[in-house]
Image (cartoon, rainbow, N blue to C red):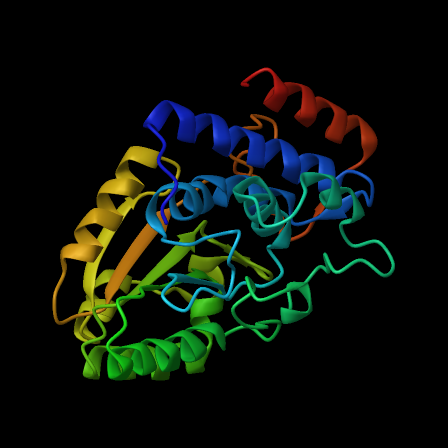
Amino acid sequence: MQASHNLEELEKIATRLRLHVVNMIAPSGQGYVQQGLGAADIFTALYFAEAAMDPLDPTWQDRDRIFLTTAHNTAIFYAALAERGYFDTEQLDTYVTDGSTLEINSSERMGPFVEATCGSLGQGLSVAVGCAIAAKRQGRASRFYVIIGDGEMQEGQVWEAAMLAGARGLDNLCLIVDYNFVQSEGSMDLVMSLEPLMDKMAGFGFACQEVDGNDLGALLGAFDRARAAKGKPSFIKANTVMGKGVASLEGLMFHQLRFPKEVADSARAEVEAQL
């Protein structure tokens, strides 16, 4: 059951998700603010236009499954789940507080809509590949979407899973890399470049696309083409800007941003002005 929204509505949803990210991280004064802001359009396209799911029946067997393998980027993940109706948005106020299920690394303790616990980077694609193979054997129409980080793609297990996905021709699998050019130690190009990434993924048997990951129209078109690809898994390199939507934060290279009150207040006002 896909939510039906036009592009203008989707852009408003993406802005609301960004506002949630700011409000969730502001109380702690630090966190994955920029990653959440940058990935908001990817999550909006997936949860509100592309994936078939039913918040009233989260265990629906034929649902599409979304795996957040960069499991620390939870503010945007929880924001998307709440806005999609999986739980009340008021629960977002408990983010990373003692006893809350909204942990910094998402886990299946949250509920069945968290498809896998992926706190150790590099594991999510392997789980999704196994699920996609099982769905093929069962004759199910479900699709499997994996959101991965560019830094995470430096993990060896990712490439083992990609090799199997290509070898099995898993056209029910779509891997989306949130390519923001930063990992925890600094610039991707300076630490360990993935390039030529598109050539590498094509060599592993993927149907490859590169899009502006902050352009909802481009993302929706990419998902349309991915669904039309037959006999191959799909790979979407979604180039994103860290901090997108807050001018003062855009492009700043911090893995975990210090977020003092005055910065949070300014960011909140800027995002609210876009609603």
Q: Nearer the viewer, residue 113 or 25?
A: 113
Q: Is residue 217 above or below residue 223?
A: above
Q: Nearer the viewer, residue 252 or 73?
A: 73
**Residue 91 in which image quadrant:** top right
Residue at 24 percent across and 63 percent down: it is: 234
Q: Is residue 102 above or below residue 142?
A: above
Residue 249 shows up from this direction = no
Residue 41 is situated, as x and y percent measured from the top left of the image, at 43, 39
Residue 71 is situated, as x and y percent measured from the top left of the image, at 58, 63
- Count of numbered badges drawn on the protein: 0
Residue at 27 percent across and 61 percent down: it is: 235
Taking the view exactly as shown, the residue that stands out farthest to the right is: 98
Looking at the image, residue 12 sits to the left or right of residue 131; the answer is: right
Residue 232 is situated, as x and y percent measured from the top left of the image, at 17, 70
Residue at 30 percent across and 81 percent down: it is: 133
Looking at the image, residue 90 sits to the left or right of residue 70; the answer is: right
Q: Nearer the viewer, residue 191 or 141?
A: 141
Residue 126 shows up from this direction = yes
Residue 79 is situated, as x and y percent measured from the top left of the image, at 60, 44
**Residue 64 in which image quadrant:** bottom left
Looking at the image, residue 248 sits to the left or right of residue 51; the answer is: right
Q: Is residue 213 above or below residue 138?
A: above
Which quarter of the figure is the C terminus placed in?
top right
Residue at 49 percent across and 31 percent down: it is: 13
Q: Nearer the viewer, residue 142 or 133?
A: 142
